[in-house]
Image: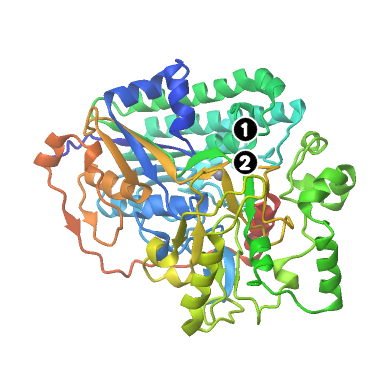
Amino acid sequence: MVPDSRKIMCIGLDGATWNILRPRMAAGQMPNLKRLCEGGAVGELDSIFPPETPAAWPSFMTGKNPGKHGAFDFLVYDPEKKRERPVNSTLREGKTIWDHLTEAGKTSLILNVPTTYPVQPLNGCLISGFLTPEGVKDWAYPPELVEELEEELGRYPHFFETMSFVCAHSEKNATLFLDELESMDRTKFEVCEKLFDRHQPDFTMLHIWGTDRLQHELWHWFDEAHPKYDAAMAKKFGPRIDAYYTMCDEYVGRLAAKVGDDGLTFVISDHGFGPTHYFIDLNSWLLQEGFIVLKNTVKVRLKKLLWNLGVTPQNATKLAYPFLKFAMKIKATAPEASLQKSSGTLRLPCMLNLNEDVDWDKTRAYAPFGWSGIFINTAGIRPNGSVPEADYDTVRDAIVERLQDLKNPDTGECVAHPIHLKKDMYHGPYTPWGPDIMPLPLDKQHMPVCFFGFQSKQPVYPNNTLYGNHLLEGIVMAHGNGARPGGETHGHLIDMAPTILYLLGLPVPDDMDGKVLEDLIDPGVLESMPITMKAMSGTDAEESNGLSEEEEEELRARLEGLGYL
Ligand SMILES: [Zn+2]
């Protein structure tokens, strides 16, 4: 039997990857993680499709693929309202780990996990995370927790002020960025310690975002093989970057110690990370191949002409940055210091835009969201669908066939494979609204993207912003009571929910797609406590109060500001 005293501490380092952690562990910069790995079990944890925050964390907490919880990207298609809305806790379906624990009388402490706003009541405490609208005050449960925390700590660092998504940072801006990152995550770790001490919860989940942010913005300062590697900045800022990882390691060690000998610590990530050398502009490619058709109006023909002549965000940054600074209203999210030397393109409006310039009656496929692949413009599914269901397979196969031939003009190599299809990626009631085709390049250095527009005339172009990006392979380590010393696994993010519930003595809900990660678990525990299943009715939809229109607008504007849309 599971001792009643077993507590589980799960620390989610967003985007953490072995490629970054292992060398630091070997160099003595992350001694606590090293100790946890050596005395416990380790492995890869494959994310979901797409390996992106707003889809991955719902999969972690529900144990389900996006076809069941409905969050495929930052925006969720709401079939009732017939429009896309920013994902939130009421738009994603499915009971979370902590909902199941609440029903079983166990307590939880859930901190900063993306997509947990609006907060839902639970047996324990919860502070919502990324995708909480700015300015709201009801981001914690119980509600008085907000006031208590802010009285003690000042403003809780809900939003990352210096987030810019523009690279080639100046020294001044890099310093601001790292200062805020360190201070934000230090507060979050310390709040976790404080609330753990106070409540002694059975399950603690802490989400730390800084690992993801740092790797997006500064990958080229610790990867000598990156085309944008900057040796001078690497030398200057290397020690600070190292210090950030060491700080995370120290706090992970402190939290692991808190669960005691009877407790178990997981360190996980929601997706992996790696360098991006090239972007693949899926909308430009679909336009080039005739799957996207533009309106035949004078205005759009003129815009297309200018675009053909090279008036694209990719070129514009090279030509006229000081002018663009005014034109693009970037300063709302990027600090002044970063703009002067930035080569970012994400915030720049495109000459051609999906929302304004596309002839939807003739467009057969498009790429509407950040990183989530190609959507066929299917009638009855997409807001302006024109492809009859009977033609779906033909259109899909034609896209796949041509995508396989997409070459990088610099290297001559085909870069857009392997290509994943909807039928292999998803199952469940929300599947129709998921992406239909998703290339995830094997070389891991080409990243397919779309930002509601057409960034570059050339579909494959050298990356000039966001130098590190998400990969499928995240991490998992397990240490303590119930972990298998020396165990190794290659699991999936959706396996964490059943694994955690099992280790807390609960049956696994049979509507979860994940499996208990037995390779991580002490064989003695598996023998003495067989895995049991719990039948679910399949009607666990949560009451929907959702976000107000103003809150949705604010979130949408902020996501656009960050370059996610
Ligand atoms: Zn990220």
The location of residue 399, given as percent across then percent down, is: 54, 68
| Amino acid at circle 1 | His
The location of residue 51, given as percent across then percent down, is: 48, 50
Q: Which residue is tagged 2?
A: 277
The location of residue 15, given as percent across then percent down, is: 49, 39
Q: How packed is label 1: few (under 14 Cα within 10 Å), some, or many (20 or more)? A: some
Rendering quarter of residue 320: top right
User: In this picture, is 324 found above or below 72?
Assistant: above
Disc marking residue 7? none
User: At 51% from the left edge and 39% from the top edge, which residue is drawn?
Assistant: 273
**Nearer to me, 497 or 295:** 295
Cβ–Cβ under 8 Å for marks 2 and 1 = yes
**Nearer to me, 462 or 16:** 462
Q: Secondary structure at mark 2?
A: loop
User: At 70% from the left edge and 78% from the top edge, which residue is drawn?
Assistant: 359
Q: Is mark 1 within 8 Å of ligand 1?
A: no
Q: Which residue is tagged 1?
A: 226
- Looking at the rendered image, the quarter that the N terminus falls into is top left
Rendering quarter of residue 198: top left
| Amino acid at circle 2 | His
User: Is tag 2's residue or tag 1's residue first in the polypeptide sequence?
Assistant: 1
The location of residue 482, given as percent across then percent down, is: 21, 34
User: In this picture, is 125 found above or below 196?
Assistant: below
